[in-house]
Image: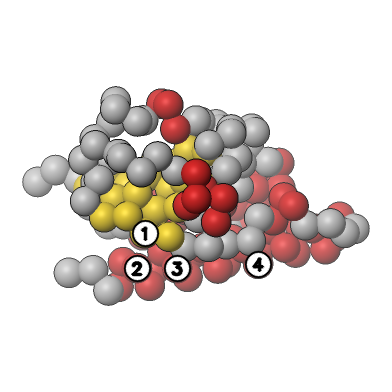
Amino acid sequence: MDKERVLFLCTGNSARSQMAEAFLGKYGGGKFEAYSAGLEPRGLNPLTVKVMEEAGYDLSGYRSKGVGEYLGKVLIQTLITLCDDAEERCPTVWPGVRTRLHWSFEDPAAFEGPPEKKLAKFREIRDQIERQIQAWLAERP
């Protein structure tokens, strides 16, 4: 059986979509190929790497990617936008997409504050995304 290809899309592909890709890889039971991209790739945020490492994930092989790496090149069945900006600006026609979902998460990289508060925000968003992935998988057949 072919794996379902899921693309997580946000603006920068620096935090939220990278986290979602990693979590689906862990919890998807081998039934999915998880991808992530950004409308304006900004590079992997070092705090993303740090908080995912705390949770047992090695993102050393990950990199920030643009939608052009997938649009018309990889047959994506499920497209999940993770921020309102990506939802508004995402191409409306995406060949092969059968399911399109929108999960709005705050951008931890946009959070202003001292380093310890910024790190706490990344952890908070990481945990929210992990719970959302688990809930989504639990409601699927």
Q: Is residue 9 above or below residue 70?
A: below
Q: CA distance from mark 2 to mark 1?
A: 11 Å
Other-residue count near label 2 (Cα within 10 Å), few / some / many at <14 / 14–19 / ≥20:
few
Q: Amino acid at mark 2?
A: Trp
Badge 4 or badge 1: first in the primary sequence = 1
Residue under the point 50% across and 50% down? 88
Question: Circle 1 is placed at which residue position?
Answer: 101
Question: Circle 2 is placed at which residue position?
Answer: 136
Q: CA distance from mark 3 to mark 2?
A: 6 Å
Looking at the image, is mark 2 or mark 1 nearer the viewer? 1
Q: Position of residue 22 (x, y in %)?
A: 46, 49
Badge 2 or badge 4: first in the primary sequence = 4
Residue nearer the viewer, 105 or 1: 105
Q: Which mark is residue 54?
A: none
Badge 3 or badge 4: first in the primary sequence = 4
Residue nearer the viewer, 46 or 100: 100
Residue nearer the viewer, 84 or 6: 84
Q: Amino acid at mark 4?
A: Glu
Question: Circle 4 is placed at which residue position?
Answer: 124
At numbered mark 4, what does the secondary structure look like: helix, strand or loop?
Answer: helix
Residue under the point 25% across and 45% down? 97
At numbered mark 2, what does the secondary structure look like: helix, strand or loop?
Answer: helix
Other-residue count near label 4 (Cα within 10 Å), few / some / many at <14 / 14–19 / ≥20:
some
Badge 3 or badge 1: first in the primary sequence = 1
Question: Circle 3 is placed at which residue position?
Answer: 132
Q: Could you tell me if the residues under marks 2 and 1 are in contact, i.e. CB atoms within 8 Å? A: yes
